[in-house]
Amino acid sequence: MNIGLIGFGKTGKAVARTLIREEGINLKWIIRKSDKKNQLTANDILDEPSDNLTEIFSINSIKLNEFFKENKVDFIIDFSSEESIKIYGEAATENGIKIVSAVSHYSEETIDFIKKLSEKTVTFWSPNITLGVNYILVISKFMKKIAPEVDIQIVEEHFKGKDEISGTAKVLASNLDVDNNEIKSIRAGGIVGKHEIIFGFPFQTVRLTHESISREAFGNGVIFVVKNIIDKEKGFYNYEDLMKPFFEF
Amino acid sequence: MNIGLIGFGKTGKAVARTLIREEGINLKWIIRKSDKKNQLTANDILDEPSDNLTEIFSINSIKLNEFFKENKVDFIIDFSSEESIKIYGEAATENGIKIVSAVSHYSEETIDFIKKLSEKTVTFWSPNITLGVNYILVISKFMKKIAPEVDIQIVEEHFKGKDEISGTAKVLASNLDVDNNEIKSIRAGGIVGKHEIIFGFPFQTVRLTHESISREAFGNGVIFVVKNIIDKEKGFYNYEDLMKPFFEF
Amino acid sequence: MNIGLIGFGKTGKAVARTLIREEGINLKWIIRKSDKKNQLTANDILDEPSDNLTEIFSINSIKLNEFFKENKVDFIIDFSSEESIKIYGEAATENGIKIVSAVSHYSEETIDFIKKLSEKTVTFWSPNITLGVNYILVISKFMKKIAPEVDIQIVEEHFKGKDEISGTAKVLASNLDVDNNEIKSIRAGGIVGKHEIIFGFPFQTVRLTHESISREAFGNGVIFVVKNIIDKEKGFYNYEDLMKPFFEF
Amino acid sequence: MNIGLIGFGKTGKAVARTLIREEGINLKWIIRKSDKKNQLTANDILDEPSDNLTEIFSINSIKLNEFFKENKVDFIIDFSSEESIKIYGEAATENGIKIVSAVSHYSEETIDFIKKLSEKTVTFWSPNITLGVNYILVISKFMKKIAPEVDIQIVEEHFKGKDEISGTAKVLASNLDVDNNEIKSIRAGGIVGKHEIIFGFPFQTVRLTHESISREAFGNGVIFVVKNIIDKEKGFYNYEDLMKPFFEF
């Protein structure tokens, strides 16, 4: 499977590292905003040797349509920002490339644009592409169905200085019809990231907890997504669509 | 809904208390082994007043067939021990009573006997009838399907003196193809009961935790079961069967 | 050791149960507000047989000074409410009885009154008399001394319906100079009570957690207090005073 | 404060990074085993710019006595292995350098050697130099003094593949007179490191938990040690000695 990555910030780097290490995946190229150091390969920068080197290009130095033709990939993985997909989206679609975006926020308008692209190719979007968070999203909704009256509390812990309420906690809350006021945010030291949903029953408590160890978890999420979306018909997919088949009794 | 309860030990008492308090349920009678105090109602013993009193009978002082005819109930809830169902099973079946058993262990032979009864009525068995534990049983199996290679560890905490490895932990383990050696048992003070399944990924950890507060959780489990099994065709059901409809996307 | 208990509400009952069971302690009598049932012993009401029965008296049916003379005890344990000590305090002091109060709140004025009593006898007050909470109070203060710049967060979990912010959490916070806004309160189902202090460092996290299982923990706290205060000179003591000798290197 | 570091493995690098960033500390040099790359400064290798560059030397290319004379430091911090101190110990002592070792294991014989050095200088050894673990070591011993009969369980969680039972867990256990069999080891995914001491009382549970986020925690431990040992008389110190002054009421 040949993959191109858009975005090479902290998370992009961790994702690149994971993809380079994964057997059966060839991270062919990375497109980033900045120009600096783009003579080096990602393998050099990340100190991750590989048979197939991953070249880095600046978005300003390439013509996308030609680039995609000459550097064929099956998937574009997008860890950049909202505006990128509007720049590369049509060129990618015309070259039959599937798009997997993990950009953390899209406006309604951008989502409409992606849906348009989906008429011609496979597109996917998840604001938090880790497997664990999405598993908890799905199973927590089932708990609410089973016990609609259960008390729900959401606790999230992050490093000191992170703005109040994590985006993931908000998604968990809206998913469960819980008000954002019910999210309790802990900020202390260097905690990487922890989300806990507490289901309180009169005589028992159920806790679903996700703990992040490092950003490479996003890379593993990408691997899950591309493996499970590769054979899909064109259309706009989310994580729940890909998890559904595993929830068979 | 009229209910009869078999068994009035510590757990039976907690279940009786929960059923007496539940609107829409009438706990009509309790059958117990011992003779003592059976002139008192369960309402007196438990200090739980109610419009419909719950009488207590000794198994030795009644003829089951006649008793079931004169004291009609929709369900028998069994919190006694393995041998009971062989005593009351056929009389119950002949009187069209559904059977819900929460006895913690049955031999293959007894299970066969229950299956026989199931040809004529609705029967149900769960060795741990709490909602929380069964929810975790179901969702943990889905995680294993999604990520077959994930590391799984099971930790259970109970009061000092409890024999090594809880039955529920063993069920969780066998459900996930985890060896009993992988269960870590904590024994300290008066911990009521905690079960945790740890799913370890390279860069994230997911924990599913169930904490027992008190035995009344078994009563709430019974209420879930009777409400969700009342309209079923005759047959032998388990908790998964009743949860299935809630796991629809 | 002969003990008299003031207060026989939910917590008073749990404390009485613990004291009746404790070897070396004789719970001689209980004084309560209400008149009902006071012909029964505490042993009957609590179903706790004992060689020395614990009689129950109504505050309205006795003259305290005479009562204390005729029913000599070493300690009065007070689990009632703020006003009680003003009623029994002087009579107790005159009869050489030591006073251990676990009333959850006293005004400055009442504290002054207790200090007055302390000129003639041993008095002790702790708004949460459990061993665990007081241990955490003491050790958390040491952490703050060791690392004054550490991030501190306090999380407390209790049953749905409990008024915002537990008293114990407030004591923990003021003890650590943490603003009450920094306390995160979780309310769900029937959680008995959990307090956690999180110390967040850039590269490590320390958590001190106290979980309540049942009110009997207060009884064990009383036993610790009476055993460690019995030989003290007259004066007004708190939990820290009794813990100090154990914190020797 | 001028510091020299012995050892530049994974932990040594994380420690170097922390020391370079710390105001008031000048990491003057690092001595390592290997020869490669020693023309680069630690600032280059770690991408940590600083006014005072940290040079790296190979142990094979220097004469220690002369080196120490020409490259004066207040402290040597040792994150290498058992044999190192025997090589640099006497030269360091003769040059009035204080020695702080975080080597994870020393034989009795080596400890005797360090004690010998301590007759002339300040020496310090801690097999786990993080602040959090040492705090928990000290406070857990106090709990055992307060409640000698309490049930103690130790749980440690680490990444899959780590050999059974962490060294820190063993130290915690021996410190509390708990048998190593009582340590429960969880191995799953990429868990960095978690240690929990559970104190089980009949009606309450106290948990002391330490979670590692990254190896830089060792660097912060070093900073605590050098700041608190700088004014000590010559002698052999451990972490408890440095913590003692903070445990004053």
Image (cartoon, coloured by chain):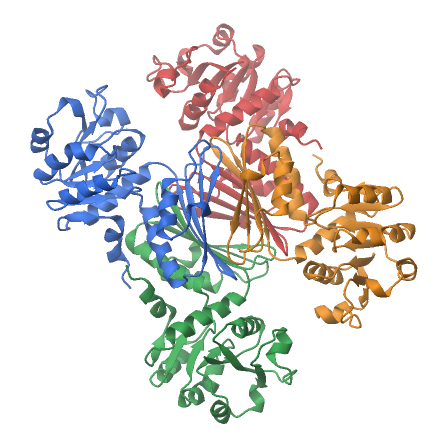
Chain colours: A blue, B green, C orange, D red
Q: Quadrant of the N terminus of chain A?
A: top left
Can you give x and y, in whole percent of width and height, for residue D67 in the image? Answer: 47, 8
- Left-right relation of D241 to D100: right
Residue shown at 41% from the left, 24% from the top: D13
Q: Is residue D30 above or below residue A107?
A: above
Q: Is residue D98 above or below residue C22?
A: above
Q: Quadrant of the C terminus of chain A?
A: bottom left
The image quadrant that residue A183 belongs to is top left
Can you give x and y, in whole percent of width and height, for residue A86 in the image? Answer: 17, 34
Q: Is residue B8 above or below residue B61?
A: above
- Left-right relation of C56 to D200: right
Residue shown at 49% from the left, 60% from the top: A201
Can you give x and y, in whole percent of width and height, for residue D2 in the image? Answer: 52, 13
Is residue A201 shown to the viewer in this render? yes
Number of residue marks? 0
- Left-right relation of A240 to C95: left
Can you give x and y, in whole percent of width and height, for residue B40 in the image? Answer: 64, 82
The image quadrant that residue D15 belongs to is top left
Residue shown at 29% from the left, 53% from the top: B146
Q: Nearer the viewer, residue D16 or B75?
A: B75
Residue shown at 62% from the left, 35% from the top: C176
